Image (cartoon, helix red, strand yellow):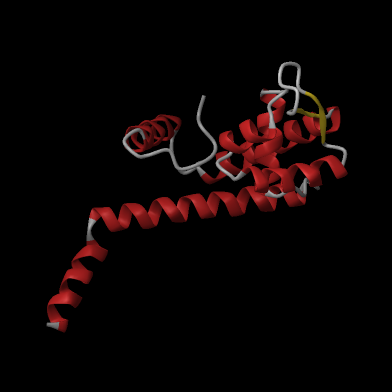
């Protein structure tokens, strides 16, 4: 009986499904590590959740904590902690919401906008370097194939391609 289980496992490990999953995860983790390293070298020491929150606030000022949490696929409590650190560091502000009495509107400060601008340029350079073995046409094909596959999956988290 053990032989059949092992044979099934070996077949799975050789399958396209397994290899695709492993390679997609390796690509994600590898690109994340490259971007984190590039950001650190450039003196941009923000966590990934802080970076995503700031990018969202730069593009969508005035969101509430709950809206920002939903857009970044974290709990409102987690987003509150992230925002507390960003406020402490002078990168985010809260003000009364224009329509909702008990809600605070969030915004990125000018320093945050500058940080996000520098960070996005550094991240882009790191990712472009990692994709350099592929031609531009192959990069476009890779993106199109990933978009087709992910379109069938449930929403799993940040960020959405707009």
Number of numbered discs present? 0
Q: Identify which residue is drawn at 69% across, 41% down.
A: 51
* Left or right of residue 69, residue 155 in this image: left
Front one among 46 and 98: 98
Report which quarter residue 147 is drawn in.
Answer: top left
Report which quarter residue 99 is drawn in.
Answer: top right
Q: Identify which residue is drawn at 71% across, 21% down.
A: 100
Q: Residue furthest front?
A: 101
Residue 47, above or below 8: above
* Left or right of residue 146, residue 30 in this image: right
Residue 62, above or below 49: above
Front one among 71 and 118: 71
Residue 47, above or below 147: below
Give the image location of residue 17, x and y in percent. 26, 53
* Left or right of residue 25, residue 83 in this image: right
Give the image location of residue 52, x and y in percent. 65, 39
Q: Identify which residue is drawn at 59% across, 44% down.
A: 74
Front one among 108 and 122: 108
Give the image location of residue 144, x and y in percent. 37, 30
Q: Identify which residue is drawn at 78% across, 45% down.
A: 44
* Left or right of residue 32, residue 88 in this image: right
Report which quarter residue 68 is drawn in.
Answer: top right
Give the image location of residue 77, x and y in percent. 67, 47
Q: Residue furthest top?
A: 99
Quadrant for the N terminus in the image: bottom left
């Amino acid at each position: 009986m053990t032989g059949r289980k092992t044979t099934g496992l070996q077949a799975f490990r050789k399958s396209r499904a397994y290899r695709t999953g492993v390679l997609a995860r390796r690509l994600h983790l590898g690109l994340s590590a490259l971007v984190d390293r590039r950001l650190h070298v450039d003196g941009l020491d923000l966590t990934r959740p802080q970076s995503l929150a700031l990018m969202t606030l730069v593009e969508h000022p005035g969101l509430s904590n709950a809206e920002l949490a939903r857009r970044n696929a974290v709990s409102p409590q987690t987003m509150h902690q992230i925002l507390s650190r960003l406020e402490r560091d002078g990168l985010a502000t809260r003000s009364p919401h224009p329509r909702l009495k008990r809600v605070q509107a969030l915004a990125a400060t000018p320093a945050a906008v500058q940080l996000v601008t520098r960070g996005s340029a550094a991240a882009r350079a790191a990712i472009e370097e990692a994709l350099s073995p592929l031609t531009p046409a192959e990069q476009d094909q890779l993106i199109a194939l990933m978009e087709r596959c992910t379109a069938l999956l449930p929403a799993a988290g940040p960020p959405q391609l707009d």
